[in-house]
Image (spheres, grey):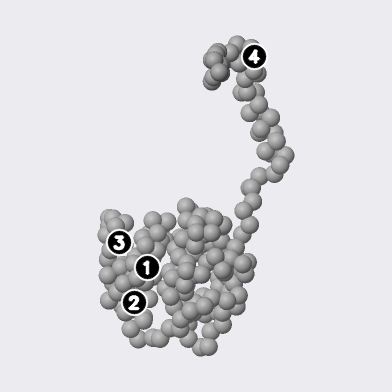
């Protein structure tokens, strides 16, 4: 089994050989490392994309807007991912953005996960019948487990989710009330043994 550091280094070098700058290649290495760590076939999709890139042109999104439409070519997931990380704090203000015709959408996934950590918010990444919930770059939940992820997404949506508890106030109050049974009632002896107790002020 290949180590994560070996994956990152090889991907970085392969990305440079595929025509990307060393800076972008380094970002791709970090992201594919994450894909494999989270159990997604990042190496497989990156290899397919680089093979396809030799014979097919892809468009780039420099400035990400609320709606990003294709003029015919599919968008490159790598330049989109790098620009997403760079612009994520501004994109967050849009609440939601969409991308038309994105090639190899799985390759965008780890970039979004890293963006989730930067802004401290969960992101929902969806295309076709696929949904991925990105949790602060700690985990990725998906309804697409053990299925073949398509190499082209006709319509992609990225939504910024508000941070909310996953439980009701009633559930919390019930649990807190139970926790109160462990609280120790303050007594005179506890007061005397508390920090600073018994010290004589000579001033």
Q: Does the CB distance between marks 2 and 1 fall below 8 Å? A: yes
The residue shown at (53%, 61%) is 132
Tell me the residue that label 3 is attached to.
Answer: 7
Q: Quadrant of residue 67?
A: bottom right
Would you call the spot at circle 3 few (<14 residues within 10 Å), some (14-19), or many (20 or more)? some
Q: Would residue 47 appear left or right of 98 to someone viewing this image?
A: left
Quarter of the image where the N terminus is located: bottom left
Tell me the residue that label 1 is attached to.
Answer: 28
Q: Determine whether the residue tagged by mark 4 lies in a helix, strand or loop.
A: loop
- Which badge, 4 or 2, comes first in the chain's sequence? 2
Rendered view: 186 above or below 176: above
**In front: mark 4 or mark 2?**
4
- Which badge, 1 or 4, comes first in the chain's sequence? 1
- Which badge, 2 or 3, comes first in the chain's sequence? 3
**In front: mark 1 or mark 4?**
4
The residue shown at (28%, 63%) is 9
Circle number at residue 187 = 4
Residue 145 at what x, y percent from top left? 48, 59
Q: Quadrant of residue 156?
A: bottom right
Residue 178 at what x, y percent from top left? 66, 28
Residue 152 at what x, y percent from top left? 48, 76
- Which badge, 2 or 1, comes first in the chain's sequence? 2
Most distant residue in the front direction: 203
Tell me the residue that label 2 is attached to.
Answer: 20
Circle number at residue 181 = none
């Amino acid at each position: 089994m290949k180590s994560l550091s070996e994956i990152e280094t090889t991907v970085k070098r392969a990305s440079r050989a595929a025509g990307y700058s060393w800076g972008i290649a380094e970002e791709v290495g970090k992201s594919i490392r994450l894909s494999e760590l989270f159990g997604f076939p990042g190496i497989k999709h990156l290899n397919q994309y680089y093979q396809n890139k030799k014979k097919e042109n892809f468009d780039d999104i420099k400035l990400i807007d609320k709606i990003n439409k294709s003029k015919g070519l599919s968008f490159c997931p790598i330049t989109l991912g790098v620009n997403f990380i760079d612009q994520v704090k501004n994109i967050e203000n849009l609440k939601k953005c969409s991308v038309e015709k994105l090639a190899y959408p799985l390759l965008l996934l780890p970039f979004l996960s890293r963006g989730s950590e930067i802004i401290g918010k969960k992101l929902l990444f969806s295309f076709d019948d696929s949904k991925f919930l990105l949790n602060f770059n700690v985990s990725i939940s998906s309804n697409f487990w053990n299925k073949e992820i398509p190499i082209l997404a006709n319509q992609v949506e990225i939504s910024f989710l508000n941070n909310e508890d996953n439980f009701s106030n009633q559930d919390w109050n019930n649990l807190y009330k139970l926790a109160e049974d462990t609280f120790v009632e303050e007594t005179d002896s506890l007061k005397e043994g508390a920090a600073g107790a018994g010290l004589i002020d000579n001033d």
